[in-house]
Image (tube, grey):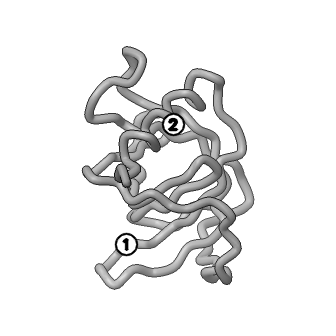
């Protein structure tokens, strides 16, 4: 059952990186989930059409605009940490923690974060 979990106080230890394109996120079975808003090595923020079930792990796929290491997606297992209704009708902000991913997905995630991080 999907429930709305209140937004927690700021406990994040890593800096979030905003995405520069509309990265689409899907469940592993190909069903659309939403779009990526920002991410870091341990979690992500998405805008979705319904909140995630908080009592289970979700396998998701982030579709990439440009291949990284000859792959066009990053597969992750996440737990929904919180969700909150967005101002847009029938959408929700969902914060999630990355709980598992393959070594190759971890490398692609790291490279995506490097791409998205503005150079100083």
| Residue 91, numbered label | 1
Please tell me the numbered disc located at residue 12.
none
Mark 1 surroundings within 10 Å by alpha-carbon count, few (fewer than 14), some (14 through 19), many (20 or more): some
User: Residue at coordinates 69% horizontally, 48% vertically from top-left?
Assistant: 57
Provide residue 96's location: percent of width, then percent of height: 60, 59
In-image side of 90 versus 42 (left or right): left
Give the total of numbered labels: 2
Q: Quadrant of the C terminus?
A: bottom left
Q: State the image quarter where residue 100 is shown.
A: top right
Q: Residue at image x 65%, y 48%?
A: 98
Of the pair 23 and 28, the residue shown nearer to us: 23
Which x, y percent locates residue 47? 40, 64
Q: Quadrant of residue 72?
A: top left
Q: Residue at x 51, y 79 (%)?
A: 84
6 relative position to 92: left or right: right
Residue 19 image offset from top left, x and y in percent: 35, 54
Question: Which mark is in front, 2 or 1?
Answer: 2
Q: Which mark is residue 109?
A: 2
Task: Depth check: give the residue in front, 3 or 76.
Answer: 76
Per the model, the C-alpha gap separating discs 2 and 1 is: 25 Å
| In this view, 42 is above or below 38 | above
Question: Could you tell which of marks 2 and 1 lies nearer the N-terminus?
Answer: 1
The quadrant the N terminus occupies is bottom right
């Amino acid at each position: 059952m999907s429930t709305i979990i209140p937004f927690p106080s700021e406990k994040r230890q890593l800096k979030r990186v905003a995405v520069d394109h509309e990265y689409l996120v899907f469940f592993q079975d190909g069903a659309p989930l939403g779009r990526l808003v920002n991410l870091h090595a341990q979690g992500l923020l998405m805008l979705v059409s319904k909140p995630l079930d908080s009592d289970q792990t979700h396998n998701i796929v982030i579709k990439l605009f440009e291949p990284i290491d000859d792959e066009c997606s990053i597969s992750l297992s996440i737990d929904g940490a919180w969700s909150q209704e967005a101002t847009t009708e029938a959408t929700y902000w969902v914060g999630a923690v990355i709980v598992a991913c393959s070594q190759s997905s971890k490398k692609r995630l790291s490279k995506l974060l490097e791409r998205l991080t503005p150079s100083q």
